[in-house]
Amino acid sequence: MIETLLGLVVALLVVALTTVVGRWAGIAAPILMVAVGVGGSFLPMFDDFVLDPEWILLGILPPLLYSAAVSMPAMHFRREFGAIAGLSVFLVIGTALALGLFFMIVIPDLGFAWGVALGAIVSPTDAVATSIIKRTPVSKRVIAILEGESLLNDATALVLLRTAIAAAAASFSFWGAVGTFAYAVVVAVLIGGFLGWLNLTVRRRATDPTVNTVLSFTVPFLAAIPAELLGASGLVAAVVAGIITGVGGPRVFSARNRLSDAQNWRTIELVLEGLVFLFMGLQLTTIISDVQAAHAGVAPALLIAVGAWLLTVVVRAGYVAPLLALLSLSARRVRRLQPRLETIAQRLESEEGEKKLVDAFARRGRTVSRDTVRRFGPRVTRGLADIRYFQEAPLGWREGALVVWAGMRGAITLAAAQTLPEDTPQRSVLILVAFGVAVLSLVGQGSTVAPLVTVLTSAESQEETRQREREERRHILEMLRESAATVPAVERPADADRSQIFEIESARRLEVLAVQRRVLLDARDSGTFDADVLAHELAVIDASQIAIELRSDRI
């Protein structure tokens, strides 16, 4: 017991130290943690270190994916959903099949089914590893695509893994595999959606920030565990619960609860991300020992891992190139709607314009009321905002190169590999290959992605982005001033003392902040402004509200 506790304390200290050193040296902390773990694996005490893969798949990944989904702008996820879905499903399947053929050729007596199983293990990108690129000045569209992909592709990979294992036992059915995948996703979405709604409903009544945060820690597990017990994807359930919480939380939770949530979840992310990469490295000597015990060569397995890693990059590049062409074509098609949407938006600004729209529908044989026409307003605004979003951040070959290179493998690859059945042919070799691909991807791509961003992102484009954000911030501040002016001033009683005056002014200020928050959230839901700029202004409003409430508590 004491040894386990001491080991956990040392692990937490290593996570904290490597994070500080990584920031000081300009090296991504996950890479340092894997290196420290690999070095520690040669110590005698870690000779037989093996982490149960269920701890990663159900203990570590659900809260990490949930937290990432909460913080991911839902508007970006919606706008990039086509690309995200393609990368999460079709690219994973294509990569697994290509790797399956490769493994069947280079690993004697493996067979195509087991090759596809290993391909499914190394095909998904890792949400934790992909977090490395979020620290670079890369296009927000690139981040949205990569983050959304890494949140969803695990479900495809794990279902494909189970299907390949079943195929190896001569019980494969194509339509059965499709049905299994559809079931895993649909059930996970339903469970995650229900838990997201329940999370908002219950926690809005928990006024104590500490209790509220404790409840939030249970949500990813309450979503993931029932989904897994029903044969669905627990990771997708946790992601869906996180997305719903991220959308509804700012309207439901108090400012103190939001601040407490943000601070505590950042700590949880740091600890879990660090531990998952540290444990990943610590298992190296155990994996190598298993390969040697099976009388298989370590060097050939590592050469196969290099080939597999290169193949994942090539297949990804071959998929992303036509994907970008399709996205550009779709953006041009949507852009043709801009004049029509602008005309409708102008007409909705006046009663005469609304009447013209009603008459236009009538000429087409459709009877539409003015109330119905007014409800078009938010959809039109959102449509115009989407068009501006695609125009201001087009995806060219530079962004495509970053989408390809930043798709890194990580801990889920090693965890999935260790779920292979004990009777898997050359199981220890397959696990070592998966480990090699993950480490090569994390170290090779993770250590070079920041310099690549610097090379491919021009100073002019970064300045344009900053200028656009400054302009949006100016418009938001004007919008906030206008909304504050709608709150009527409150007269002070002539005999009021300082305490009463403070209470009156505080009450009005809180009312102003509530109005401003609603305005910002409406702008967020319509996609009118950049999500990060809005998030910053919402944080400022929360800080102002907390300051007023704390002063009121003291008085």
Image: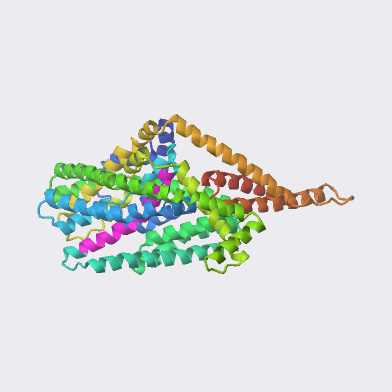
Report the quarter where the N terminus lies: bottom left
User: Quarter-wise, where is residue 350 in the image?
Assistant: bottom right
Q: How many marks?
A: 0
The residue nearer to you, when weighing 168 against 267, is 168
Q: Is residue 269 left or right of residue 179?
A: right
Q: Position of residue 328 (x, y in %)?
A: 38, 46
Please state which of residues 499 and 474 is positioned toward the viewer in this rendering: 474
**Residue furthest toward the left?**
109
Specify whether residue 56 is in view: no
Extreme-front residue of the structure: 363
Which is more toward the observer, 11 or 338? 338
Q: Position of residue 180 (x, y in %)?
A: 29, 67
Query: Up-down: is 355 above or below 506?
Result: below
Picture layout, residue 442 above or below residue 60 = above
Residue 251 in view (yes/no) = yes
Q: For the magenta stretch, what is the residue range? A: 141-165
The reply, left or right, for residue 280 in relation to residue 544 is left
Magenta segment, prevailing SS (helix, strand or loop)? helix
